[in-house]
Image: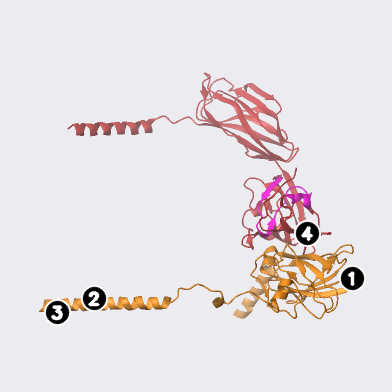
Chain colours: A orange, B red
Amino acid sequence: MIICMSVMITVLVSASAPEVAQLPFVISGYVFYENGSPAYNPDVTITNLNTSKTFSTKTCTSGNYYLAKPVLLSREINKDDVLQFKVAAGGKSAVLEYRITASDMVYHGLHLNITLGEGAGEEAEEGTTSTGTGGGGKQTLTPSVTPTLTPSVPSQEASPSPVITPTPATATQAGKAISTPTLTPNTLLPHEKGEKKIPGFEAVFTIAGTGLLAIAYLIVKMRKGKRGVNVQ
Amino acid sequence: MNKMRRMVVFGIGMTLAVLAVFTAPAVAQNIVYFDPDPGSAAPGETITVTLWLNATDGIASFNDNIHFDPAVVNITSGTPGDFPAMWLFVHYGTGVRVGGMSSDYLDLPPGRHKLATFTLVANNSGTSTLYHSDHKLSDYKGVLKSATWYNATFLCTETFSKSLPKGWNLVSLPLNPMPGKNHTSEVFGTLYYDAVYRYDATSHTFVDVTEGTIEPGVGYYVHVANASTWIYNGTPYNEMEVPLERGLNMIGWLNCSKSISDALSSIAGNYNYVARWNTSLQEFEVYVPGAPFNDFNTMEQGKGYFISAKDGCPPLTESCGA
């Protein structure tokens, strides 16, 4: 009976509560060929690999700009989610993965410029992340796709977000293609954070405690001694 | 002995001083004021405002100049109250000169007396102060009596009306609510709503203001339980200066429409995008500066917006006239 009532109350409460107000997250950018020329009318598909949700994008035939329909923050995208960008233009295609960073979450957006590589099997050239929203994140290439997408060089904006594990690090920094790179969150374990502690702190306590005990013992002994004198 | 005498003298002196303070006659405090204050009317409408005297002295006559902003309001007539003799009402464009004496030219006793009743016609939306100058009160001998003359405010109000569909609506106040009428329940009184939130750009959280107060320049998410029409009165919100935090800000807009490039010229280069919520489609629409295409290009009265501001973004300053 009680269970039934509590279930009913829960249902009633959830039914009467308004759905959550939404916050936007905007993904946009430009697509270029390796030689820097704009890749007109690109076909850009963005998928959140964490939720498998695909976001529709808009492009125009006379331009290289893409704009995803604004995403609902929290419901459709979250920090550390990995977005997969499938981009095709002018007979070239590529796949790029990007992990959402804390900086992207602050600005509620990601402006990601993408550069398409030249030929199959070639290393992708440096791309550019935007100077606008986001830009703090790093990208990884998914190899095996012909003209590959290039990862952008991360902007200078410090962000506690993911870093690419060095495989090889130099290539990452240079914006070169990486073979199966993985993203690791830059979250350090407590013991790795280098929290400052006073060395030998416990020992100091022990010494101080022992000293106090010794002093107390001496005082007691002295009092006993005095009493003894008085008795005599 | 001398010391004793001194102490006695000092004590007597103190006693007399205290007595002098307590037995001093109270300073007369005549007060002149308008009622209602503030007065308000829509453009073209007429209201009546009364000028009252709360007298602590006997008063036989008064004179007063009342100034106003003719763009907002006009005093078209003035009729006498308790000082009808030698009644004076002269209009001179940006003010009126009024005056009169008691009917028997003798002092009216202390108390509340009506000096005049004015007819005010609202011209254009805005606020005008009704302020006094060259004023005087005197008794039947012509002796001037001091008084406090309180100015008043006249609000030429507009009515804002907007249909809101069921669900979350991102809105802002295009009108300053009437003084003391800025409680959420008063501004959204015509809506069937059950929740109102603003967004705190510093803590990155929504703040429930369903039972609070609201103001122009701020964006509000209003959850409308049943489609209804939002109607309220106020004076136009024509100028804004809104600080923007790094990241997402939920802001309001003015009582006019402007292209976004013009509307946000004060923060050009310092924001990433502007977004608004389409309640019917349950999705956001976005404007990205410099992009070849956008979902919308104007900022409109009554709507609220999200602005993703870059680090160091200056305040958003804009006015409808600029």
Residue corresponding to mark 2: A219
The mark found on residue B213 in the picture is none
Span shown in magenta: B236-265
* Mark 3 to mark 2 CA distance (whole Å): 14 Å
* Mark 4 to mark 1 CA distance (whole Å): 25 Å
Residue corresponding to mark 4: B288
In terms of sequence position, does the residue under pointer 3 or pointer 2 come before the other?
Answer: 2
Residue corresponding to mark 3: A228
What x and y, as percent, mark residue A107? 69, 63
What x and y, as percent, mark residue B52? 59, 32
Question: Are the residues at dot 4 and dot 1 in contact (C-beta closer than 8 Å)?
Answer: no
Q: Are marks 3 and 2 on the same chain?
A: yes
Chain ID, mark 3: A
Residue, x 61% and y 23% (percent of image)? Answer: B100
Chain ID, mark 1: A
Residue, x 70% and y 75% (percent of image)? Answer: A170
Q: Are marks 2 and 1 on the same chain?
A: yes
Residue corresponding to mark 1: A90
Mark toward the viewer: 2 or 1: 1
Could you say whether the residue bearing mark 2 is in a helix, strand or loop? helix
Q: Are marks 3 and 4 on the same chain?
A: no
Q: Can residue B176 be seen in the rendering of this structure? A: yes
Q: Amino acid at mark 2?
A: Ile
Q: Amino acid at mark 4?
A: Val
